[in-house]
């Protein structure tokens, strides 16, 4: 594993992220049953079905704040003097109780908060620990369990925004932590309880993308009894898997695997399949998304409660790498699969696979994870089907299936020079077995299954040769063969190998239209162009925006098992609010004070959602159901007649002032 | 340790919950180090921050105010960040009225995946403010 200091792409994302599950599509996979509310572990957001509507224990006007400062093991404690912060918190106004927790989010930490609320009659709670983006719901639910309205909770982020970014300055980091705690406490003192609105959830899902992940998600949602609209931009379902020959983890062919999924989706009564279609518009929020699906120019409005993004990925086209596009028989992994699937492989005896073409610090920075496994799978395919391959076509012209969507158009541009004595016909049938070399920078065969294949490859005498970014192999045409020259790292010498075919393992890349969809859905893309989930550990497959989920290679390179597992995961996540039938909408809303409002209408113009209208009395009025809580209205109101609940100007001002209190 | 003459500027930052706060979190999970001179106030949208909050901070002892929102087109609330951008022009004018250098207020777009950018912006701004000297309102 990578050291902790590495960027998250490396350190926070082990190669196997969503746990492996026995999820080959043809097998029965445990799915959430209709009507059941699955409780995924580690997701603290939905802990209580019906949060107790107990009002806050505001016995008097006295503000009683409890402050809980977290060590987070050594994550905070190692870089911030936590006991000093606790002692400091005790000195702050309105703080009646302050303590530290080794892990505030662990059961004993939560219990300490729960108990202290009761014992010390706390009516405000602040936790200073990680980030509210992942942990606020957990601590808020603990407050509710103890009878405290969740809007009386405030967070101080002293890990992501303090201890982890000031690891060499303990004194300064401790001072900053004190300032952040003071700021949170100043806001907490001004918090008021809020009541959440109950909003009905439309029991219908929109699944965007009809590949293996989208199909798995759609079928699972449909089988749980909810309507699904499955939108596929191509003319048929199946996605990238239709290109593939066989699947790594199953002996079965890819076509056999995907076909039952397609058939089931086409025939399921709960699934409406929209082919040749795209999602044009998305408005609304969890439970009530208004979407427009456009099919061949005609559009259709569909109201859904949840959205699952499964738009997949494309294979990187390695223009300019290793003679790709110049020489016959320099193909990408997927092209190899297409040839193998159609029994169009030429006679090949010596095959070189080159890994990490265009990835890991070349055109793309990331590791595509799956290509090592795929190359090994194909190397073994050649080994095991060698007799058949030699018999195929007799060294004829290499043709690539051009009916494959997406990647076909680009592929057609490639000129395949096939001379009479082309490399496809290496002068007589090769004697002996195939010889396969895999040029790699390091072999990433994560998980038990891939490791087994790797060991099998070694047993079959497939050669693994390492190269570095500074010393890339070179491919040239030499007579009728492809000559791969490379630097041998152990022998410290230049070597050459003659091959009949060179297969380039290129990374999966995000499709160019991902960014357009991300804008429509208002969900982010990561640095590599894939969709960015709320948190890679704590909330995988969720977006930060409620009610929208992501699975499959739209989320990043993944193999089929993982794509299916993620698809089913999304189905479970989406089913929770739909099965419950309602959600509690966040009470972060604008409120107009009609006694101050002069009816100028600036807010009406400024509201991006049309959630403010003028009443007959000539004052502004907020339509609570349409308000999303951005606060644009409040910040533009010349009379300051608009208050953003939970983010009032008074509260923000108090935070600012409190931060500056530390200034000498 | 430090030079006696050098002062440590204090920056108050308003970060939107959906992009920039997440970007700052990412800087943390990536362990990208930046100067500890910044104190973050989380807001739902950069569009909810009233110019008075900025001016108030600058006249009450902050050496700089940093406002971060989603990139244009990426705003979680459609166009709140554009409101913040428009308001920045007004803030710039107010800075002149208050006799403050324009560098003391900075608007930046930081997405949820731009932890490195957030760290860079903070580092740069701290350097800039060190060059500028303490806020005249600090005395």
Image (tube, rainbow, N blue to C red):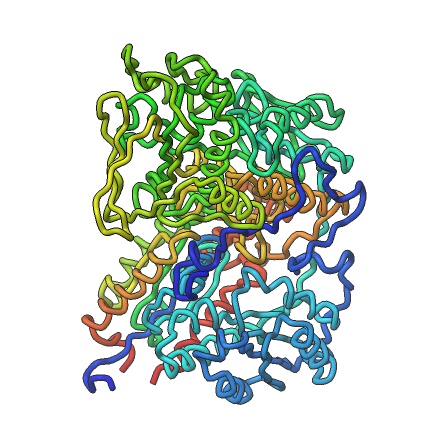
The residue drawn where x is 49% and y is 35% is A380
Q: Position of residue B92 (x, y in %)?
A: 28, 58
Q: Is residue A591 visible?
A: no
| Residue name at image x 39 percent, y 42 percent | A463
Can you say which quadrant of the picture contains the C terminus of chain A? bottom left
Q: Is residue A477 visible in this depiction of the protein? A: yes
Left or right of A208, for residue B17: left
Query: Outermost residue toward the front?
Result: A431
Q: Nearer the viewer, residue A157 or A244?
A: A244
Q: Is residue A629 left or right of residue A107?
A: left
Quarter holding residue A239 = top right
Residue B71, position as x, y percentages in the image:
38, 47
Who's the residue at 56% across and 33% down the image?
A247
Picture coordinates of residue A31 (x, y %)?
74, 43
Report x, y in % for residue A511.
Answer: 43, 33
- Left or right position of A658 against A54: left
Q: Relative to the observer, which residue lies in front, A426 or A239?
A: A426
- Residue A57 lies in quadrant: bottom right
Q: How many marks?
A: 0
Between A77 and A591, the residue placed more toward the observer is: A77
In the image shown, does A308 or A584 lie closer to the viewer? A308
Q: Could you say which quadrant of the image residue A259 lies in?
A: top right
Note whether A152 is above or below A376 in the view shown.
below
Above or below residue A109? Residue A548 is above
Q: Is residue A50 above or below residue B139?
A: above
């Amino acid at each position: 594993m990578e050291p902790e200091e590495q960027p998250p792409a490396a350190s926070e994302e082990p190669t196997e992220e969503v746990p492996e599950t026995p999820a080959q599509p043809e097998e029965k996979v445990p799915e959430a049953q209709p009507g059941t509310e699955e409780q995924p572990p580690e997701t603290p957001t939905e802990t209580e079905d019906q949060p107790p509507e107990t009002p806050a224990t505001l016995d008097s006007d006295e503000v009683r704040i409890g402050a809980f400062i977290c060590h987070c093991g050594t994550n905070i404690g190692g870089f911030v003097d936590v006991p000093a912060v606790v002692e400091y918190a005790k000195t702050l106004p309105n703080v009646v109780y302050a303590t530290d927790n080794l892990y505030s989010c662990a059961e004993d930490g939560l219990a300490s908060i729960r108990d202290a609320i009761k014992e010390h009659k706390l009516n405000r709670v602040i936790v200073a620990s990680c980030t509210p983006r992942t942990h606020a719901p957990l601590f808020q639910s603990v407050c509710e369990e103890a009878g405290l309205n969740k809007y009386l909770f405030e967070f101080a982020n002293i890990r992501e925004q303090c201890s982890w970014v000031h690891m060499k300055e303990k004194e300064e980091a401790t001072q900053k932590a004190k300032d952040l705690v003071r700021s949170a406490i100043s806001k907490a003192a001004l918090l008021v309880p809020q009541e959440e609105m109950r909003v009905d959830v439309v029991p219908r899902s929109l699944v965007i993308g009809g590949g293996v992940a989208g199909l798995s998600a759609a079928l699972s949602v449909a089988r749980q009894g909810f309507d699904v609209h499955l939108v596929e931009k191509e003319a048929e379902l199946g996605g990238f898997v239709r290109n593939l020959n066989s699947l790594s983890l199953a002996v079965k062919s890819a076509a056999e695997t995907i076909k039952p999924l397609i058939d089931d989706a086409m025939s399921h009564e709960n699934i409406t399949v929209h082919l040749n279609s795209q999602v044009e518009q998305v408005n609304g929020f969890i439970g009530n998304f208004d979407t427009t699906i456009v099919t061949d120019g005609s559009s259709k409005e569909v109201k859904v409660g949840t959205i699952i993004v499964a738009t997949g990925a494309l294979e990187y086209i390695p223009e300019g790498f290793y003679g790709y596009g110049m020489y016959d028989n320099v193909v990408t992994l997927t092209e190899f699969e297409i040839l193998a699937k159609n029994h169009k492989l030429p006679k090949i005896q010596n095959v070189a696979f080159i890994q990490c073409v265009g990835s890991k610090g070349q055109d793309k920075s990331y590791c595509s994870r799956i290509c090592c496994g795929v190359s090994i799978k194909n190397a073994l395919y050649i080994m095991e089907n060698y007799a058949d391959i030699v018999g195929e076509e007799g060294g004829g012209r290499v043709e690539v299936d051009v009916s494959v969507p997406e990647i076909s158009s680009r592929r057609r541009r490639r000129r395949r020079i096939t001379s009479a004595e082309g490399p496809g016909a290496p002068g007589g049938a090769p004697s002996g077995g195939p010889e396969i070399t895999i040029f790699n920078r390091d072999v990433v065969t994560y998980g038990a299954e891939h490791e087994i294949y790797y060991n099998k490859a070694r047993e079959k005498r497939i050669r693994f040769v390492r190269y570095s970014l500074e010393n890339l192999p070179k491919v040239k045409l030499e007579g009728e063969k492809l000559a791969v020259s490379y630097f041998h790292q152990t022998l410290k010498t230049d070597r050459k190998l003659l091959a009949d075919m060179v297969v380039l393992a290129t990374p999966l890349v995000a499709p160019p239209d991902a960014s357009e969809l991300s804008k429509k859905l208002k969900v982010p893309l990561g640095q590599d162009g894939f969709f960015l989930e709320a948190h890679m550990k704590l909330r995988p497959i969720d977006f930060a925006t409620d009610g929208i989920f992501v699975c499959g290679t739209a989320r990043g390179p993944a193999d089929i098992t993982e794509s299916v597992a993620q698809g089913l995961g999304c189905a479970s996540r989406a089913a929770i609010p739909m099965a419950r039938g309602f959600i509690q909408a966040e009470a972060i809303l604008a409120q107009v004070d009609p006694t101050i409002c002069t009816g100028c209408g600036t807010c009406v113009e400024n509201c991006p959602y049309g959630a403010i209208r003028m009443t007959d009395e000539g004052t502004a009025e907020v339509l609570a159901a349409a308000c999303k809580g951005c606060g644009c209205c409040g910040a533009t109101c010349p009379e300051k007649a608009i208050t953003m609940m939970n983010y009032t100007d008074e509260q923000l001002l108090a935070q600012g002032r409190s931060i500056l209190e530390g200034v000498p | 340790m430090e030079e006696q003459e050098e002062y440590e500027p204090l920056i108050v930052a308003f970060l939107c919950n959906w992009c920039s706060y997440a970007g700052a979190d990412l800087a943390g999970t990536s362990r990208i180090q930046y100067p500890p001179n910044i104190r973050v106030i989380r807001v739902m949208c950069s569009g909810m921050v009233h110019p008075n909050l900025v001016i108030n901070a600058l006249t009450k002892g902050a050496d700089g105010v940093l406002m971060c929102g989603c990139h244009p087109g990426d705003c979680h609330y459609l166009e709140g960040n554009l409101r913040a951008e428009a308001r920045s022009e007004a803030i710039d004018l107010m800075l002149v009225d208050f006799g403050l250098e324009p560098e003391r207020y900075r608007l930046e777009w930081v997405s949820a995946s731009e932890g490195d950018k957030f760290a860079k912006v903070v580092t740069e701004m701290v350097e800039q403010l060190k060059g500028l000297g303490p806020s005249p309102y600090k005395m």
